[in-house]
Every structure is written in structure tokens, then in C-alpha cells.
Image (cartoon, grey):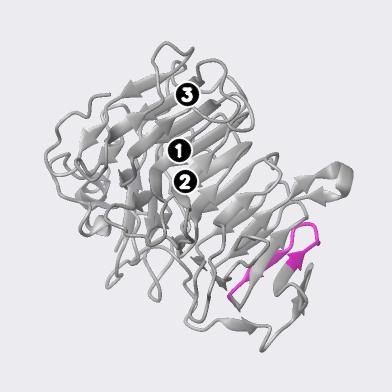
Amino acid sequence: MSPIAGLDLTGARGVLVELTDVPIPDSEAPLMNTPRNFDSVSTLRLRASRPVLMVAMATLIFAATGVAAGMPATAASLQKAPSHRSTCATVPSKCGYPDATNTGPSPARLTQVPAERTSGSGWVWNETYDTVFVSGRGAVLKGLDIAGGVVIDAPGVTLRDSRISSCGGDDDSDVVAVRYRPAENYRGARASIVDNQILGSPAGCTHRARSGVRDVFGAAPDVLVAGNDISGTGNGITIEHEGVVRDNWIHDLGHLPGDHHSGISTHGGARAVRIRHNTVLLHDQEFAGGGGVSGAVTVYSDFGHAQNVMIRNNLISGGSYVVYGGNSGDSYSSPATRIRIIKNRFVCGDWLYGPLAAFSLKGVGNKWSGNYCDGSGRRVRR
């Protein structure tokens, strides 16, 4: 029996265990308010992959030494983080990182949309656009197999435990689009996209969807993107304004000639973006027709000043540079600020030019600390 709330994990397969660090010191905290989904205390998250079990979350507060007095030894063994010298990239879940075994939907059977269902509470299938439009406040879409895209236009929407497959098209649309522009009645605040399989190049496609999940207008507040298996898209996740991107598995991107890909990206003007404990492995992808992978995690100054981004405890590889730190982009004019790149596990050598570009510690509040090589534990230098 698990010591966590008496839950029986016997036989659970692909359990993802993450013990986050103790509360973030003020020196690492954002100057803006943190979103609702940002963990400010240590949490032990247990999640068994489909089809066995899902344990939503148990929150425990530990002393700085790590384990509360009297806690059973079995719990302590679950809390043990992988050694820096472990090789995690081959099978990320063996080190507690996301991969195919611990992300994506849990239900054994998904309801096909539109073949079996074309509407539900707060949502409707649009045949013209091959898309589900969500307009109902607080709508929950769960256990669906959607042969098209999803557009979230209402607040408090949850999309979870589903498969969403979309080719994009000539309009270069996304698999899951979050739209927030109140003046035009788009109100997709507080969207949660959790534990889905997101496919951007399903069988039969001649195109690829632009992004797996995207904040379309760059203003969506308090977005949560967590536990998703994302592949076949031009970019994995694009979050611009505010939210948390955690525990996602991003791999095997789709391509059109000339594409330049990012696993997780943000393009300037962020209020508070947290990118934590994702697996983004993009090395050795070969693309026809020109283009390629820019980086696993990219912060640019395309739409505004790059700021307020935390990149922490991710397993990452691939790109010209694996991480871009904000000092580049169409609107770049002054050094990025409050960009914190901390305790990430790089697959060292799995890049074209290096681990980091367009970053300076001279920017106010910027930090580069504790980043290391998968397998050797060697420090990654800027």
C-alpha cells in the first residue's frame, strides 16, 4: 500500500513521480502574481499511466531536509530524485520524467467526435471547420477522440483525457487554440489542457498543424498545459501571457518545408510563464525542404519585451541551440529580464551549436543555475 492517502499502487505501470523543490526563495520568485496552477510548496505527484490508475495529487509539505519525521521508508524511496549521473533520455519515465508511459489519456475507450457525438455541454462540432468550438463557461470535455481541432473561447474550460488529431490546413491552424480577446467576445481565460494525446500529423495528412497548444492572441490568462503527449505539430506548446506548462512529452514534430520548430515557446510580454518538468527531445529529426529545429525551449522578443519566464527541471535536447533566452526576436531592443533557467537536464552534445543562445545575466532578475548534463552530471556552462 502506498503511504499517500492509503492508495494501493500495486501493479501500477509507468508511474510518474515528481518531488518539486522546497518553496522558491524570493530571489527566484516572479515579481508578478503567480498563476493558480503554479506550485509554491513541495508536492509529490503520483500518476500511473493508462490504463491502470490515476492518482490526481497529494500535497505534502516537507522540511528543508526533505522528509517529514515519521514518514514510512516506502515514501522516502518514492521521493528520491534521479541522480544527475543517471541516463534519462533513453527512457525518461525511469527517472520520473514524462514520456509515452505516463502522459496522455487514461480512459480505455474514447468517444469519437464527430462519428459518435457532435455536441455536449458548452461545446459543438463545426463541420465546416472540422473543429470543436467551446463557448460554455466551465465546460469540461473528457474522454473524447476528436478528429479535428479544438478552439476554446470561454473561461474555465477543461479539456482532458482525450485524443485530439488535426492536420491544420492552409490557414495553418492549431490542434488546440485558446483565444482570449474580450473586445471580440473571445474569453478563453483559465483554460486547462491536461492529460491528452495531441497529434498534428495524423494518418492521411498532407499538412501539419501549427502548434499542439497555442495562446492565439498572446493574452490568455492563467493557462495550464500539463501531462500531454504532443507530436506531429510544427511547434509543441506556445504560451505567451500567463500560465504553467508542466509534465508534457513533446517529440517527433511535423514539418513543412522552411519550418523552424520549437518544443515550447513564448514570444515576449509575458506576465508569468512557468515551464517545468517537461521532456522535450528533438535531436536527430531530419526534415526535407529546408528548415529545422530552432530549440527545445525558446524565449523570444517577437511580440514584446522578453520577461518573467521560469524554465526549471526539464529534460531537453535538440535545436541549433537547446534554449533561447530572450535576447533575440523581431521586437528585440533591450535585454530580457527575469528569465530564470534553473536545474534543467540537458542531453549534452545533442545540439547543433550549443546549449544556450541569446541570454545574458546582465538582464535584471535573470538567472542561470544548476543546469547539468544527462548521464554525466557535468555542469552546463553558458
Please name the residue shown 42% across and 25% down the image: 340
Which residue lies under the disc numbered 3?
327
Q: Which residues are the magenta region?
A: 133-144
User: Could you tell me if the residues under marks 2 and 1 are in contact, i.e. CB atoms within 8 Å?
Assistant: yes
Query: Which is nearer the N-term, disc 2 or disc 1?
Result: 2
Quadrant containing the N terminus is bottom left
Q: Quadrant of residue 312?
A: top left
Query: Local crowd at mark 3 within 10 Å, few (<14), some, or many (≥20)?
Result: many
Reply above or below: 12 against 335.
below
Q: What is the x, y in percent for residue 265? A: 50, 42
SS at badge 1: strand
Please say whether residue 57 is one of the residues in the magenta stretch.
no
Q: Is residue 162 visible?
A: no
Which residue lies under the disc numbered 1?
298
Query: Local crowd at mark 1 within 10 Å, few (<14), some, or many (≥20)?
Result: many
Query: Which is nearer the N-term, disc 2 or disc 3?
Result: 2
Which residue lies under the disc numbered 2?
264
178 left or right, relative to 289: right
Q: Nearer the viewer, residue 352 or 317?
A: 352
Quadrant containing the C terminus is top left
User: Could you tell me if the residues under marks 3 and 1 are in contact, i.e. CB atoms within 8 Å?
Assistant: no
